[in-house]
Amino acid sequence: KFDVIDGLDSDADNICRDSHRRRGPTTFDSFRADSSLTDCYLEPGVMYTLVLYVDRAYPPYGGGQLVKLDVVGPYPPAHPTKPGVPLLRPRGMSFIDTNIVNDQISGVLTITSAASEADITHYHVYYGHLNEKNDILPPIAIINASGAYLYTVTLHNSAIPQDTSTFIVFCKNDAGEAVQPSYMAILDASMKLTSVPLVESFSSTAARAFLRIHLEMSDAFGRADVAVLPKGVEGLAKP
């Protein structure tokens, strides 16, 4: 949304989507771009480009002017009870589990550095739940901030602690850890039941048996294969 300071208010929807464009005056002395123009979070310290195109309100269109403005994601204010800690956080994380054993993970956790490491000495990597780290366990890794774009942590047959759902990374300096971390969900490559399966109904005819089974799995995308075996030979069933 454009909030015009000296002129007529104009809505970004009208400017960008209305085939007839905005009706009325199109020359403004100044305007202010509202955050809803992009409707996205600007990562602190990251460089962005604001692209602005100005054209006629009526046909013929296409003779306008395109302007590109560099902007930097605004830094959050210093924390009132933790002055001096880093204000930035890692820009991204990625991890793919290659271990098919339940509650174990293997793979490379890749961390994209903060936009600036001027006040960062280390990155602390933890297990956690959502955006809260596990204070009982020590960090998975402590990484020196060396100016690299990417940092990696290799995990091999690492047991996932109880009540853990995420990797969490804090930027750190001599004043302590940043208030705002980066975090991502841990997606275990294995699939397991999170409750005991329940046979809700059973019926049969001369040729077929019909079972309705309720089960809960550890991931939203899974498959259940069912086999019915004579009692005593169920040990033959393999994954």
Image: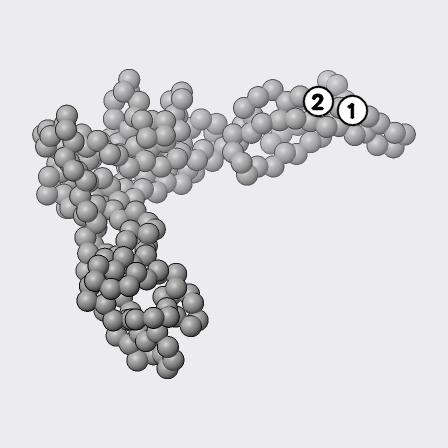
- Quarter of the image where one finds residue 111: top left
Q: CB of mark 1 within 8 Å of CB of mark 2?
A: yes
Residue 224 against residue 197 in the figure, above or below: below
Residue at horizontal 21%, vertical 62%? 6
Type of amino acid at the residue the image marks with label 1:
Phe
Q: Quadrant of the N terminus?
A: bottom left
- Quarter of the image where one finds residue 90: top left
Residue 121 percent location from the top left of the image: 12, 36
User: Is 171 left or right of 92, judged from the image as shown?
Assistant: left
Residue 98 against residue 24 in the figure, above or below: above
Q: What kind of element bears circle 2?
A: strand
Residue 214 percent location from the top left of the image: 65, 26
Residue at horizontal 53%, vertical 36%? 220
Counting other residues with Cα less than 10 Å from the Cα at mark 2, is it few (<14), some (14-19), or many (20 or more)?
A: few
Residue at the right extreme, as displayed: 206
Residue at the bottom extreme, as displayed: 60
Inter-mark Cα distance, 1 to 2: 7 Å
User: Is 173 left or right of 15, judged from the image as shown?
Assistant: left
Q: Nearer the viewer, residue 208 or 2?
A: 2
Res. 144 visible in picture: no
Residue at horizontal 14%, vertical 43%? 117
Type of amino acid at the residue the image marks with label 2:
Val
Residue at horizontal 29%, vertical 71%? 26
Q: What kind of element bears circle 1?
A: strand
Q: Which residue is mark 1?
A: 202
User: Is 108 left or right of 145, judged from the image as shown?
Assistant: right
Label number found at residue 199: 2
- Quarter of the image where one finds residue 157: top left
Residue 119 percent location from the top left of the image: 10, 39
Residue 88 against residue 27 in the figure, above or below: above
